[in-house]
Image (cartoon, helix red, strand yellow):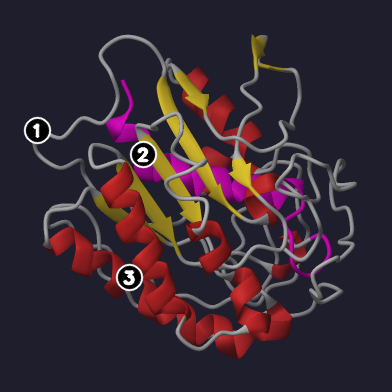
Amino acid sequence: MACSSASDGSSDDSTGSGGGASSSSGGPQTTASAGEGSGVSSTTSGAGSTTTAATSGSGGGDSSSSSSSAGGAGGASSSSAAETSSGSGGAPETGFQPCPATGPCKILPLGDSITFGLGFDGGYRVELFHLATQDGHDVTFTGTQQMNGPAMVDGKPFPRNHEGISGETIQQIANRVPTPALRDVPHIVLLHAGTNDMYQSPNGADTRLGALIDELIAGAPDALIVVSNIIPFPSGANAVSTYNAKVPGVVQERANKGAHVIFVDQFKDFPTSELGDGVHPNKAGYARMAGVWYDAISDYLR
């Protein structure tokens, strides 16, 4: 979030699990603390499907190198990301298929340093690629920012592209849409945005998110746009709670108008023990995020 990764492709020192954050944009340097935040009661998704999520964000317990199933306060029991991914999703819209019949489904990871993968090289994209390929799906990632992540995953070349820039607010992310973010038009967009707004300017963040979604709909009208609320940010818990409560409605408003947009809950059951530095996930936290994304998109993949 608050660590610098310049849009010209320069890198921040972000490899390795649980790395700390170094800020060039005034972001907080926090340590993991018990998360707060009221639950997000939500609607959402695509054509008529509805999801509900009630959450609490606190939680100690042990984190695992794979996603853990900690829910709210209490310890985390270790399991795979595919088993523990909590979040919404919903059945595919009837007749809507964003991915091509042949060739890889192009997925655009869009956001800030949490999308970049600060704290674990490749972030949630590593486990997401694993989950998709182990189920036989052909996927790749698109984006114009500095490539990161491992060279290989499960014996296959890992697509290291993404569109995550550390320190960027919702508006700054929107400034990259349609160019350069949609230069290679994706079939699926994964949007996690707003963490930097929570300490810079939380008021109106939901309105800015809606405008960003509108830009994505206009620039990639045939893509599935998957919008999440944000993971816990303990030092801005009140702002996060307020923002997260509004995100499902922002998404549903667009879905009601026929846009291919769905909501997923990345906040639910995310323990602060899986925040490596109080802001960015560690390896287990990124695996948890991957499971939530995968639950949302798996039925759309070929």
Q: Secondary structure at mark 2?
A: helix
Q: Which tag, 1 or 3, sits closer to the chain's start? A: 1
Q: Are marks 2 and 1 in contact (CB under 8 Å)?
A: no
Taking the magenta stretch, the answer to whether it contains residue 281 is: yes
Q: Residue at x 27, y 63 (%)?
A: 51
Q: Position of residue 300 (x, y in %)?
A: 28, 32
Q: Nearer the viewer, residue 284 or 108?
A: 108
Residue 199, relative to residue 50: is it above or below? below
Q: Residue at x 60, y 68 (%)?
A: 169
User: Which residue is denoted by mark 1 in the rendering?
Assistant: 95
Q: Can residue 54 be seen in the rendering of this structure?
A: no
User: Which residue is denoted by mark 2 in the rendering?
Assistant: 297
Rounded to the nearest angstrom, the CA distance separating label 2 from label 3 is 17 Å
Q: Is residue 193 left or right of residue 150?
A: left
Q: Nearer the viewer, residue 263 or 288?
A: 263
User: Which residue is denoted by mark 3 in the rendering?
Assistant: 248
Range shown magenta: 276-302
Q: Is residue 192 left or right of residue 26?
A: left
Q: Which tag, 2 or 1, sits closer to the chain's start? A: 1
